[in-house]
Image (cartoon, grey):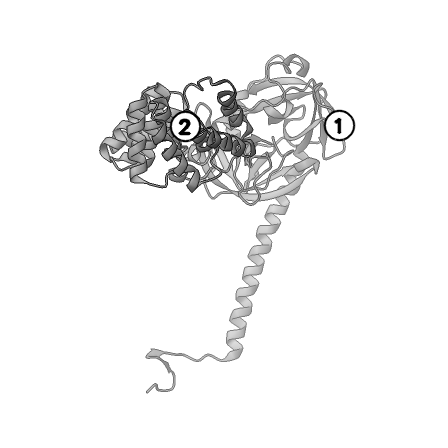
Amino acid sequence: MLEPGELWGYPFIEAPMKNNQSIVLLLVAVSLAARASAEETLAELVKKTMPSVVSVVAYSPDRAMPSIGTGFFTAPDMVATARHVIAGADRAEVRTKGGQTVRVAGIAAEDPTRDLVLIQLASAVGGVQPLKMSTVLPDPGERIFTISSPFGLEWCVSEGIVSGIQDVPSAGAAIQHTAAVSPGSSGCPLVNREGLVVAVQTATITTGDGMVTAGQSLNFASPAKVIPTLKPDKVRTLAECSKEIPLGWVPPITREIDGVGLRPFTREDFQRALPYFEECVRREPSEPDAWLRLGLCRDRMGNLDGALEAYKKAVEIKPDFPVAQNNLGVAYLRKGNHAEAAEALRLAVKARPEYVEALSSLAGALIELQRYGEAMDAAGKSVKINPGYAEAHLHLGVASYHSGDKEKAQAEYQSLLRLQPGLAEKLKILLDTRWSLGPLHGPLHSGKAEWACSPPGGGSGTI
């Protein structure tokens, strides 16, 4: 039994309630004071930085309305921004927090690879304090803030952290961060808690419709330490430079972000994924799935012989591998090796009896071999499993015609009119003229069910 002053065998010390309240209140006060101090520090930094930030308004002869970006003073008559902000522009101006609008005289220096530019102003702006650049890359987890003109809403502040440093092929480091940015933020400074610019905003990951993906905060910026290396030379007017970098240009540091890390998998970017699977088969030569993926990449890039080699290796290691057998069969079909195609596709169906694509492709191979009865059987099974699979209806119609069942062929034509009129026209040519359709086989199975993940359909875009 517990004795007074104990709690399940552990000493329990009672303190007067009044003292406890004092300790709690003291802790709360300290916490609030620390928070207020941090907020004041950020507010003071923003207050000092904001007059050095400008909106950039760029006019292109190919666009009715000007485009909007952000920049910041590196000298009273010099502004740094993202190069794509003035791409295709023949004139531009900057708007200062103090209410001045100053014409851009031209480009003083640039680094298109990293999407950076120094623009010369037609006149110096008095009373501004140029921002200082950090000479080193920020650390992941470091807090930063931005001031920019998202969607033209000028001098908006957002805060975040550096979430990573990505090594972009041919362009160097890209600073990934979580501060909120939108179209119009391009060229804005990312400022650390020491008031130094650590990077310049250049890009973000977007969805298929080009809009920023809410909540993801996949934003990228070029290191600010590059800016002091841009040595101003003879100023060239925007009109002179407008044809060199046209409207809609995507800089290398943005374009190459799609090849960083494992991102190619999320976009089914077979070209960029190829080196990964080449390394996979070198590392694990007995892994059939790696050979399948290598074959897919080669196939999608037009290297049919290389794809055949990889598919054959996959089924050599694992004969009952339906996707690899299917892809091998279709690759043989495209090479005109119909007997080999039929055998591979037969094995795909044996391993997976309800494999719609393989059944349809098998029917195509059997048609090429003039084995029309077997082709009708394979295509009929494919249609039964998936009545909406148009290629199987085409193969069933062709095989039926050649087997003498014109009524069945006509019925398949009617089905194709509903499903895919283009394929219906192919069958109609045969029905009307008795011409051979030539090679007929199903499409390459995409392997999406076995691929790393479904693609979101987005890309990296400048904002």
Could you tell me the amino acid type at mark 2?
Ala
The earlier-in-sequence mark between 1 and 2 is 1
Q: Is residue 305 above or below residue 20?
A: above
* Pointers 1 and 2 in contact (C-beta within 8 Å): no
- Position of residue 205 measured from the top left corner of the image (x, y, whole percent): 53, 35
Residue neighbourhood size for the residue with mark 1, other residues' Cα within 10 Å, grouped as few (<14), some (14–19), many (≥20): some
Relative height, residue 275 to residue 336 (above, below): below
SS label for mark 1: strand
Q: Residue 312 occupies which quadrant of the picture? A: top left
Q: Is residue 117 left or right of residue 447?
A: right
Image quadrant in which the C terminus is located: top right
Which type of secondary structure does the marked residue at label 2 adopt? helix
Asked whether 363 or 105 is in front, the reply is: 363
Identify which residue is drawn at 32% across, 31% down: 345
Circle 2 is placed at which residue position? 399
Task: Locate residue 372, reporting x and y percent.
Answer: 36, 27
What number is the disc on residue 132? Answer: none
- From this view, report whether residue 6 is shown above or below residue 421: below
Q: Which label belongs to residue 101?
A: 1
User: Image quadrant of residue 202?
Assistant: top right
